[in-house]
Image (cartoon, grey):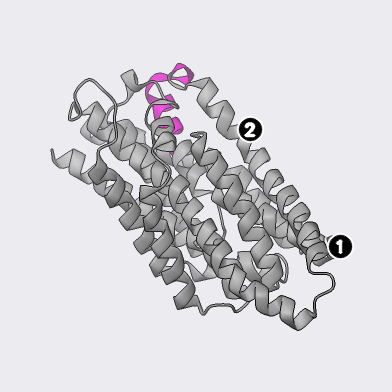
Amino acid sequence: MEIIVLIIALALVFDFYNGMNDAANSIATIVSTRVLTPFQAVAWAAFFNFVAAFAFGVSVATTIGKGLVDVSIVDNFVIFSGIVGAIILTASATHFGMPISVSHAIIGGYGGAAITKAGISAIIISGYTKIVLFIFLAPVIGLIGAYIFSILTLWIVKNKAPRKVDKYFRKLQLLSAAVYSLSHGSNDAQKTIGIITIVLFTNNMLGETFYVPFWVIILSHTVIALGTLFGGWKVIKTLGMRVTKLTPFGGFSAETSAGLTIIGATMGGIPVSTTHTITGAIIGVGSIKGFSAVRWGVAKNILWAWVLTIPLSAFFAMLTYLIATGIFG
């Protein structure tokens, strides 16, 4: 029982770091446009992170729990090592202000631990193929969606006075930030939900049927909301202020496009990267002013962080598995 409690506690630590690192995704634009203060913004985002618990079901959690790794080889060592690998990478990235994909950290860690135990056959290829595909599709969809959305919105307000337009979009950005925070909670909290559920299932605490207990849903959404409330200010600065300079109009377009993209993925049970999606959307908005408006050097550094997330978290998880089984196995 002690090991089960420890693993669940670690999963919640990961969930908290998820909220901290991905708080930037939810509120970077609304802070950088000065619609809300940082504290007001994190409180706004945290509220909708929690509300998401009641909105979009548990399809993503089911994918994480039984759609990535053969459950017959999963044991406490695999789950423990996967979480630790993800926590090491996420904590490091948050410390250095890099907006990595927390989703891919847990997916890479879980897969790395499983491969260390049982080889590549432990991996469900179709599950990982879908995720790898959306590594590329999510930011592209976010970018194109934000670009088109921006053009259409500019056309609608083309005859309005700039000051009035700015005033309208300051108010509308409250709505778009809520939509994005709702999408963040709906997709990202479910990754922790899936991990906790597979712990319970592996240890015969759910019977023979894989299902998600309601208390796991509420607990996971509460912790990710607390992580968001605590905030990851370095990452907020990187995303909201260094990639491109945003106006309330740009923030509204980026958040709306990214939020709708993520909600669509959640409803399809696809664990996407909220970081990839909002970054693509921010670049799409910046491109409206011309490609020179985007700080491509910063964007390149972020891209490298994305590319390295899965292999690095897998590497840390592999080391953790070897050490843990060597000491306790």
Amino acid residing under circle 1: Gly
User: Is residue 229 at least partly visible in the picture?
Assistant: yes
Q: Secondary structure at mark 1?
A: loop
Within the magenta stretch, is there residue 77? no
x and y percent of residue 302 in the render?
65, 55
Residue 301's place in the image compared with 40, above or below, is above
Taking depth in this image into account, of 221 and 243 the one nearest to the observer is: 221
Q: Which quadrant: the N terminus?
A: top left
**Residue named by callout 1:** 290
Instruction: Work out which residue is located at the far bottom of the displayed protein and give it.
Output: 163
Mark 2 surroundings within 10 Å by alpha-carbon count, few (fewer than 14), some (14 through 19), many (20 or more): few
Q: Mainly helix, strand or loop, the magenta region? A: helix
Q: Residue at x 58, y 62 (%)?
A: 176
For residue 227, which quarter of the picture? bottom left
Which residue range is magenta in the image?
A: 109-121
Q: Quadrant of the C terminus?
A: top left
Which is more toward the observer, 57 or 12?
57
Q: Which residue is mark 2?
A: 133
The residue at 54%/22% (across/down) is 126
